[in-house]
Image (spheres, rainbow, N blue to C red):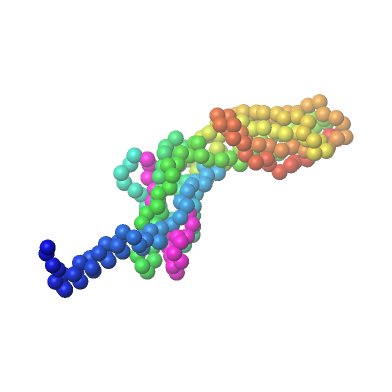
Amino acid sequence: MYALTGRQSLELSFAIILLCWADCSPSLQEDLAPLEVKFHSLDFRHVLHWKHPQKAVKNLTYFVQSKIYGDKEWTNSEDCQGIRLLECDLSQATSDPREWYYARVRSFSSEGFSSWVLSHRFYPQWETSFSPPQIKVTMTGRIISVQIKPPRTPLRGQNGSRIRVTKLQKLTFRIYLMHNDVEEEVYETDSCSKELVIEGLRPKTTYCLQAVSVTPRSGRKSLRSPSTCISTH
């Protein structure tokens, strides 16, 4: 049987310690990695969120990249390099609602860079939620006219104005007519209709209206808009 010299035994012990440290101890890269990296999307405003890593480190900054699913190259998010915030608006980088996207985040401190943390695969058309439409109510006798304005995206058209969400996603709008906090009627219009006319109302009665955006394919609904109230003559 081969016997180790004292020096060989010491070198072997040191090698075993190093291997155990590499395999059994959490790496610095993992300790500093951001947590819970995920997209939140409302009206096609796509914001990537994350949380601080488990290890508390001063002066921690974050770097964000994104790419289209299938692309090899990652693109730096210009406004999210070396930031201290725990979010990054990627609306422009993920502006096609029918593409799949990934994003990733890593942190940097005096101890170096963390490993990258990947988001889930993000599909805007399925995952964005919508605000309720704005409504403007006018009264003529006992007829209520409801003007409906769809929510707008952060994206801008050629004329510089923000694009309506209905340019990117088919929606219907549900209008609730209430009296004394009791729901009396529910009306539904498609996204092409800009006005709803409600007739046959009782005289000298106060009605309140609320609106909701509905995604027809999934049935998902927005929150209700604040009540708008008006009285018949």
Is residue 59 covered in magenta?
yes
Taking depth in this image into account, of 30 and 109 the one nearest to the observer is 30
Question: Residue at horizontal 84%, vertical 34%?
Answer: 232
**Residue 84, position in %: x, y?**
46, 62
Identify whether 48 is placed above or below 20.
above
Taking depth in this image into account, of 150 and 182 the one nearest to the observer is 182
> Given the current orientation, which residue lies at the most extreme top position?
200
The picture quadrant where one finds residue 101 is top left
> Given the current orientation, which residue lies at the most extreme bottom position?
6
Question: Residue at horizontal 56%, vertical 31%?
Answer: 218
Quarter of the image with the N terminus is bottom left
**Residue 11, position in %: x, y?**
19, 69
Say if residue 173 shows up in the picture. yes
> Given the current orientation, which residue lies at the most extreme right position?
204
**Residue 142, position in %: x, y?**
82, 30
Taking depth in this image into account, of 147 and 4 the one nearest to the observer is 4
Quarter of the image with the C terminus is top right
Say if residue 161 shows up in the picture. no
Taking depth in this image into account, of 163 and 57 the one nearest to the observer is 57
**Residue 18, position in %: x, y?**
26, 65
Is residue 56 covered in magenta?
yes
Identify whether 6 is placed above or below 40.
below
User: Is 48 displayed left or right of 10 in the figure?
Assistant: right
Region of the chain picked out in magenta, as a range: 50-69
